[in-house]
Image (cartoon, rainbow, N blue to C red):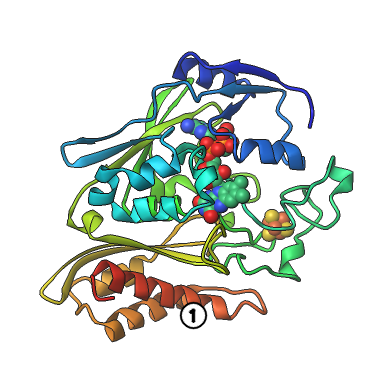
Amino acid sequence: MDNFTYDRAGSVEDAARAGAGGAAIAAGTTELINWMRLGIAAPEAVVDISGLDLRGIARDGDVLLVGALATLNEVGTSDLVRADAPVLAQAALKAASAQLRNRATLGGNVLQRTRCPYFRVEAANEARVPWPCNKRVAGTGCAALDQPFSRAAILGWTQDCVATQPSDPVVALAALDAVAEVQGPDGAREIAMTEFHLSQEEGGLDEETRLAPGEVILGYRIPVDAASRGSAYLKVRERESYEYAMVSAAVCLDHADGAIRSARVALGSVAQKPWRLSRAEAALEGAALDEATVQAAMDAAMEEARPLPGQEWKPRLAANAAARAVMMAGGAI
Ligand SMILES: Cc1cc2nc3c(=O)[nH]c(=O)nc-3n(C[C@H](O)[C@H](O)[C@H](O)COP(=O)(O)OP(=O)(O)OC[C@H]3O[C@@H](n4cnc5c(N)ncnc54)[C@H](O)[C@@H]3O)c2cc1C
Ligand code: SF4
């Protein structure tokens, strides 16, 4: 790890100014320090925002406000989040380990990098990266195309990179139609969480999110409605604890008398962004809340998936997870 300077931000403006000047913004540091250890990042300056007042969770009319510095355990155990957006509470508590969740913030969580094993290798410098990875050393190629891993993308990828965004909470935030409030050196703005992350098709190799240098996430605005209150998260992983998702599904469902009024469905670990299934959402509006109908909508939605050779099982797993999450949200299982 290289030397770096360390400062505590006294205000969001301080942090935005330092970030725009090249400093790395640090919150819980559970991700940032790993990047520095692995050689993925080597900032000359770090600005610590953990002392800022961005931790609250509150209701403002029909909107739930969650501060960027709220930890995953605070989000997951908050009575407000559990009542108004259970999908977010469930996703937060299914992330990482209890110890990490006490430190990991929701702001930092959405900015974590891919868990592609070829990317996460420890290498002191570019010359020591042992296999092709365009994200570590531009122009070297992508080892995952020939040796795919179970968390590789099936949507939105390019020949340059098939990495996925591994966060659980981003999937919930996308299904909830949440909006990130951000403030940069040039002022404040909002970014819809369905637009926050970019697939490789949208952002190429360099752009993974729409956040500009120096922009600080202040928190998230989550519209509260019947669908957000009737929401659920399903995470499929190789072991039941302390493991990233192979596929996950977040569903916000409004239903009555066995019929679906509206459904919002997002998949995780299938792309470099949470993937909203808008075609399935349209098909489910007004449809019966029964397993066959819901499964058919998800199977049709997955026809656009492009799995790598050897990964043909993944669209089926994603469709099944999405269908099951709808039935969970509907209280049918
Ligand atoms: C072993 C392990 C297992 C994990 N398993 C899971 C899992 O199963 N599911 C899951 O979802 N996550 C998982 N995580 C990821 C974990 O949740 C994130 O590391 C954590 O949430 C990041 O938050 P942080 O506050 O520590 O971020 P930091 O490490 O402080 O920062 C991460 C990035 O976000 C930026 N940043 C942080 N806060 C802000 C802000 N407010 N505004 C602008 N930029 C900001 C930083 O500059 C940095 O680029 C795991 C992590 C580890 C180490
Ligand atoms: S998928 Fe992306 S991160 Fe993984 S090896 Fe290929 S280029 Fe690197």
Query: Given the current orientation, which residue lies at the most extreme front position?
Result: 99
x, y percent for residue 48: 56, 23
Q: Can you give x and y, in whole percent of width and height, for residue 68 in the image?
A: 42, 34
User: In the image, what residue occupies the spot 72% across and 68% down?
Assistant: 145
Observer able to see residue 113: no
Q: Residue at x 38, y 40 (%)?
A: 74
Residue occupying the far bottom of the picture: 292
Question: Residue 300 placed where, x, y %?
Answer: 39, 80
Q: Residue at x 29, y 76 (%)?
A: 333
Residue 280 lies in what quarter of the image? Answer: bottom left
Where in the image, quadrant-wise, is ligand 1 located?
Answer: top right
**Residue 82 located left or right of residue 30:** left
Measuring from the top left, give residue 111's x and y in whole percent: 54, 42
Q: Quadrant of the N terminus?
A: top right
Q: Amino acid at mark 1?
A: Arg
- Secondary element under disc 1, as helix, strand or loop, is helix
- At a point 19% along the width and 79% down the height, the residue shown is 288
> Which of these two is toward me, 92 or 247?
92
Is 166 positioned to the left or the right of 70 in the image?
right
Q: Foreground: 237 or 250?
A: 237
How many marks on residues? 1
- Return the residue found at the far left: 257
Asked if disc 1 is less than 8 Å from ligand 2, the answer is no
Q: Is residue 197 visible?
A: yes
Q: Quadrant of residue 322?
A: bottom left
> Which residue position holds label 1?
316
